[in-house]
Image (spheres, rainbow, N blue to C red):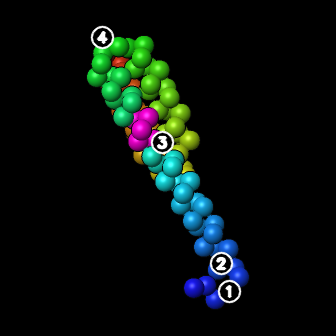
Amino acid sequence: MANHKSCDKRILVTAKKNAINTARRSAVKTETKKALKAIESGDKTAAVAAVRSAESKIMKAAGKTMPKKTASRKVARLAKKVAKIA
């Protein structure tokens, strides 16, 4: 139980941010899985579109729910896989 009014506010703010961060991380994972599935299918146009969507989600999460360099690394690895598709 919180002893101060400011502690009550921090509890609410933390819960709200936690929900946002969880949703953002989940969206990144979902988009990444979709992109990997599209890459495995071998259809380059679908893979490019899926990776573009995943890149958008990943870069929006960069600096908020994941470090910027981690986000850049994830994007680079997806792009490298797309480039390998003939």
Read off the magenta span: 27-32
Q: Quadrant of the N terminus?
A: bottom right
Residue density around tag 4, few if under 14, some if 14–19, many if 20 or more, within 10 Å:
few
Earlier-in-chain disc, 4 versus 1: 1
Earlier-in-chain disc, 3 versus 1: 1
**Mark 2 or mark 4, whichever is nearer to me:** 2
Disc 2 vs disc 1: Cβ atoms closer than 8 Å?
A: yes
Question: In this view of the protein, can residue 53 be seen by the observer?
Answer: yes
Secondary element at tag 2 = helix
Residue density around tag 3, few if under 14, some if 14–19, many if 20 or more, within 10 Å:
some
Disc 3: which residue: 27
**Above or below — where is 77 with respect to 63?**
above
The amino acid type of the residue labelled 2 equals Asp
Q: Which label sits on residue 8? A: 2
Indicate the position of residue 41 as horizontal and vertical percent values: 30, 19
* Residue in the image at 34% along x and 29% along y: 36
